[in-house]
């Protein structure tokens, strides 16, 4: 969309160029201008469509197969989209059939694994469709030297974050990473969230998980998200914990780092510089 011209008498218009937030929209009498109102309605429609979009797990499974990766398709206890939206608790656990199928798989493949990656539609299947494969590509590029054993990618229809804990426990996994579509915003209908848990088991609360959010082209890049996630995974293996006791202190490249100075991503944890 073409940006509005800058009015030197209205500095708010310059700020509009720096953020997708709805500021300096103007007014017509006591109402919004028609263009601003139509933009809002369009963004709202995009967010609503993202919530109700069906999970195309067959396409993701086919793309994984092309890369030589196996996948398993499971379903939460939420039978359909309406029950998923109205009963969050049902999305946090597997259906009886899926739980039994996973037990059968674990029996046929004993010994457990280091890592299981779970992909669930969440509240935006659009985010999963757009970002899962590009992110996994970057993650696998960076984790190759760690030598972790990895289970087939688990695809879950109508899944919420906590369902990953049950999957990890049933597979005897040391770590679980959940890729899930986040609740759409009016400027971000396709935001992917990453949730990491060490020693997953049923009943864990959010305090035991680490979250990396807003993974998308306009937000956190795939490479940066993979870098931060791998830092958390390596530290979790070293310290045998995750969640609020595991802080993200991953080293990242900045302009200063390119000049030979190491900078931390999390400025709140850094000592002041002189």
Image (cartoon, helix red, strand yellow):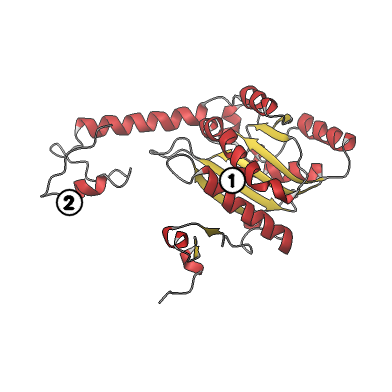
Residue 26 in view: yes
Residue sitting nearer the eye, 167 or 250: 250
Quadrant holding the N terminus = top left
Nearer the N terminus, badge 1 or badge 2?
2
Given the current orientation, which residue lies at the most extreme left position? 9
Which structural element holds mark 1? strand
Q: Position of residue 107 (x, y in %)?
A: 89, 37
Q: In the figure, 213 relative to 247: above or below?
A: above
Residue marked by disc 2: 11
Horizontal relation, residue 29 to residue 255: left or right: left
Residue sitting nearer the eye, 31 or 237: 237
Residue sitting nearer the eye, 53 or 266: 266
Q: Residue at x 63, y 27 (%)?
A: 60
Horizontal relation, residue 33 to residue 40: left or right: left
Residue marked by disc 1: 194
Horizontal relation, residue 56 to residue 260: left or right: right
């Amino acid at each position: 969309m073409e940006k509005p011209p800058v009015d030197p008498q209205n500095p708010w218009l310059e700020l509009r160029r720096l953020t997708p937030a709805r500021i300096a929209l103007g007014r017509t009498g006591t109402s919004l201008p028609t263009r601003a109102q139509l933009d809002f309605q369009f963004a709202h429609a995009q967010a609503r469509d993202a919530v109700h979009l069906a999970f195309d797990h067959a396409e993701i499974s086919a793309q994984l197969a092309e890369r030589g990766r196996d996948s398993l398709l499971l379903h939460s206890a939420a039978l359909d989209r309406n029950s998923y939206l109205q009963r969050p608790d049902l999305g946090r656990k597997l259906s009886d059939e899926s739980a039994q199928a996973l037990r059968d798989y674990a029996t046929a493949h004993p010994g457990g694994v280091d890592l299981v990656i779970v992909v669930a539609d969440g509240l935006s299947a659009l985010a999963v469709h757009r970002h899962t494969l590009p992110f996994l590509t970057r993650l696998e590029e960076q984790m190759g030297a760690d030598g972790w054993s990895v289970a087939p990618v688990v695809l879950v229809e109508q899944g919420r974050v906590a369902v990953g804990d049950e999957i990890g426990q049933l597979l005897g996994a040391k770590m679980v990473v959940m890729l899930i579509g986040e609740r759409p915003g009016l400027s971000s209908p396709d935001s992917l969230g990453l949730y990491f848990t060490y020693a997953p088991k049923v009943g864990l609360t959010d305090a035991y998980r680490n979250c990396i959010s807003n993974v998308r082209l306009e937000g956190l890049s795939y490479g940066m998200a993979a870098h931060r996630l791998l830092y958390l995974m390596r530290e979790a293996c070293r310290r045998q914990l995750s969640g609020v006791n595991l802080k993200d202190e991953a080293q990242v490249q900045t302009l200063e780092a390119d000049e030979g100075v190491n900078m931390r991503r999390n400025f709140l944890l850094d000592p002041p510089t002189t």
